[in-house]
Image: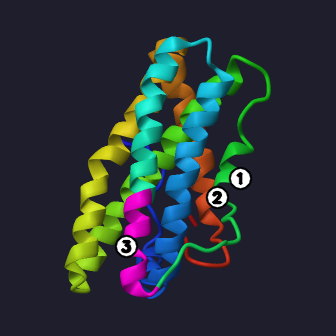
Amino acid sequence: MLHLAAPTRADWLPQALAALPAILVDHAHCEKKAASTAMNLIFRYVDQPDLVAALSPLAREELEHFEQVLALLPARGLALQRLEPAPYAARLHAAVRKDEPQRLLDTLLCCALIEARSCERMKLLAEGLAEAEEAELAAFYRSLLASEARHFSTYTDLAAARFGRAETMARLEALAAHEAAVLATPGPEPRLHA
């Protein structure tokens, strides 16, 4: 359903659970970036009303998720702080073609893949946190799964409406292979997308 070319490596979850404070702070930043990305697309493609109409509520929902993660931090003695950005998104977006309309197609599909990977990893976190007797946090991550999957569908549907299902799925397959290669090189620290 999420069209990921490869699953998350088996060692990611234990590392993420061991670095849970960093994962939570990183998650807040990821939600903020997702809202910002949707807004940037609205500004860049303001002449496309269906794109604007689809991405405006998505941006609001991402911002709500950001606020939900922020609310979890103080109870764990955490605060939002600057983090060195994980290389994942930059490496993924390096495959975006520069000229329109291919730039739009690739950007929408990279956003879709980020949402798909978020969904997969949040499911892993929910399962791992439940086993670690972190019921509240496990329930929180389970509550996000439908939204993340829906965001994946929003981005792929916007692409298919513009480029057709066949071209969209072929490009999604190519970008998914690129995304899997990006994740094959782990970042220096556990992150939601590294």
Name the N-terminal-most of marks 3 and 1: 3
Amino acid type of disc 1? Arg
Distance from Cα at disc 1 to Cα at disc 2: 5 Å
Residue 95 located within the stretch drawn in magenta: no
Amino acid type of disc 2? Tyr
Answer yes or no: is residue 192 visible. no
- Residue for point 27% across, 65% down: 140
Q: Are marks 3 and 1 in contact (CB under 8 Å)?
A: no
Q: Which mark is residue 91?
A: 1
Q: Position of residue 178 (x, y in %)?
A: 63, 47
Q: Which mark is residue 141?
A: none
In the displayed structure image, the side of residue 95 where residue 106 appears, left or right:
left
Which residues, given as a range, are shown in magenta? 67-77
Q: Mark 2 falls on what kind of element? A: helix
Identify residue for label 2: 88
Q: Position of residue 163 (x, y in %)?
A: 55, 14
- The residue carrying pointer 3 sits among few (fewer than 14), some (14 to 19) or many (20 or more) residues within 10 Å by Cα, namely some
